[in-house]
Amino acid sequence: MTQQTTTPGAPAADPRLAGLPASAVAHVQAALQALQRGDADTALQQAGRVLAGTPDHPEALRLAGIAHAVGGRHELARDALQRSLERRPGDALVLIDLGNAQQRCGDREGARASWRSAAALAPAHPMPPYNLGRSLQLEGRTDAAIELLSQAAGLAPDFIPARILLADALVHAGRLDEADAQYREALWRNPACGDAWRGLANLKTRPLSEEDREQLALNHDRADIGEPDRVAMGYALGKACEDHGRHAEALAALQSANGRLRREAPWDAGAFGARVDAIIAATAHLPAPVEPLPGREAIFIVGMPRSGSTLFEQILAAHPEVEGASELPDLELVLRGESTRRGQPFPAWVAQATAGDWRRLGGEYLERTARWRERCPRFTDKMPENWLHAGVLRAMLPGATVIETRRDPLETAWSCYKQHFYRLPHFSCDFDDIAAFIRDCQRAMDTWRERDPGHVHLQSYEALLRDPEGVIRALLDACGLAFDPACLRFHEARRSVRTASAAQVRQPLAADTGRVDGYGELLAPLRAALARAGLSGT
């Protein structure tokens, strides 16, 4: 879900166009039409023609700011919108779009201030509470987000993005019945809403009904829907068919959805493997840390998606000393910022980094994540892709604990193939790409565990199912935590869970969570891909 901009129609009598000649009004209307069809360049040209004759007109500046934002030029968008606001103080529409630009520029507090001002000026407008709620939800402030998103959905019942984001937040809070109702309300308004079907499919503990399957099959093939909705419904149709034992149809639906995504953005497994080679080599020799303890607060949970990482985090978050922060982008952002500063991509600069550099970067990470230690001394960072960066942690955050979660390769691979990931290109759309990615992840983590055995630990999902208490005790010991019986009742922990497993970790452990057996020989190609990568599965 994205922040929403404001591009209302602007007839000639609109007071927002006061002071413009008729020719300029025509350019404003042309700019609006261009924005409505997503043509940012034409919109900017039309707004520029207005500004050439009437410099600093607030509405032309606003439209120029929106056009810059659509084109990804967020600093230019912010500057144009600030100029617009200076010339028309108290303009709620400008404040809404200014907040969006500020957020994109990294000014989170400035964005929220703009949206709050807009809400005070236009209390009936749904955009300020929607954008505020979205911002808070991304930070894990789920209860506050639910309140704001409920307000937005109430102000504009047909504004489906607000309803979907509200449903997502309710899932994260464990309020699954309410979430289900919101997704279905969205589908009542638009039966081909891919985001609503995606949300229902991600309630993995609840099977989709036969009626759901029929509705998905009917709407999936409509000619009047966009590709994102068709892809999302394809994944949901795969789940619905699997839920009802129609495995051949499930596989066909998932093959179609994954094929569409892969054609949109192909994954380059060879290039990715070469990158992993470069990272492993670059992190072989790192300077000894200045101090041994920085980072002790952090517990990184890394590895393959769909390997049980959310479950292990839920167990740790049930401990009274641990805050479950879910998937944080901060480690990648810190390293990306250093790459920008040095003018070299990661890991090209790793060999030049001194112990002092790593200490500085570790401090930056801890500063960025400080809010997750407001209630507890320790916190989890469960971004699975952090395995790519785990090799530098012994220099950057030498006191941190790294937990790698592993699940049977076949179950992991199939679960990834069924999951709709939004970050493209993605490895999960092709069996051979999935197998190569699992192999790269395992060989990198094996290397880093050998280099730093005191801080990098392997946890097996299947072992947890076989011996929950024994594995949980070992997990807590690896993290330097005393045993607490609350960790055995992890499903009772009340926290925001912002991953695709949010519904699953609200339940006790199930002895049988496998899904591949029902497919039999239908998954022979996936087994063959894993075998070619040197992996084996059930």
Image (cartoon, rainbow, N blue to C red):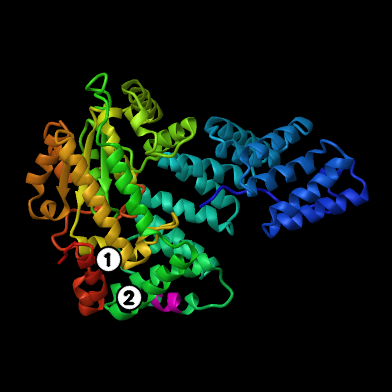
Q: Residue at x 30, y 55 (%)?
A: 503
Above/below status of 72 relative to 529? above
Q: Position of residue 161 (x, y in %)?
A: 54, 55
Q: Secondary structure at mark 2?
A: helix
Magenta-colored segment: predominant secondary structure = helix
Q: Secondary structure at mark 1?
A: helix
Q: Position of residue 162 (x, y in %)?
A: 53, 52
Looking at the rendered structure, the kind of residue marked 1 is: Trp
Asked whether residue 216 is drawn in magenta, I would say: yes
Q: Nearer the viewer, residue 448 or 86?
A: 448
Q: Earlier in the sequence, mark 2 or mark 1?
A: 2
Q: Which residue is mark 2?
A: 251
Identify the magenta region. Answer: 212-217
Looking at the rendered structure, the kind of residue marked 2 is: Leu
How many angstroms separate mark 2 from mark 1 (CA)? 10 Å
Q: Is residue 64 left or right of residue 439?
A: right
Q: Is residue 484 left or right of residue 420?
A: left
Q: Position of residue 407 (x, y in %)?
A: 19, 56
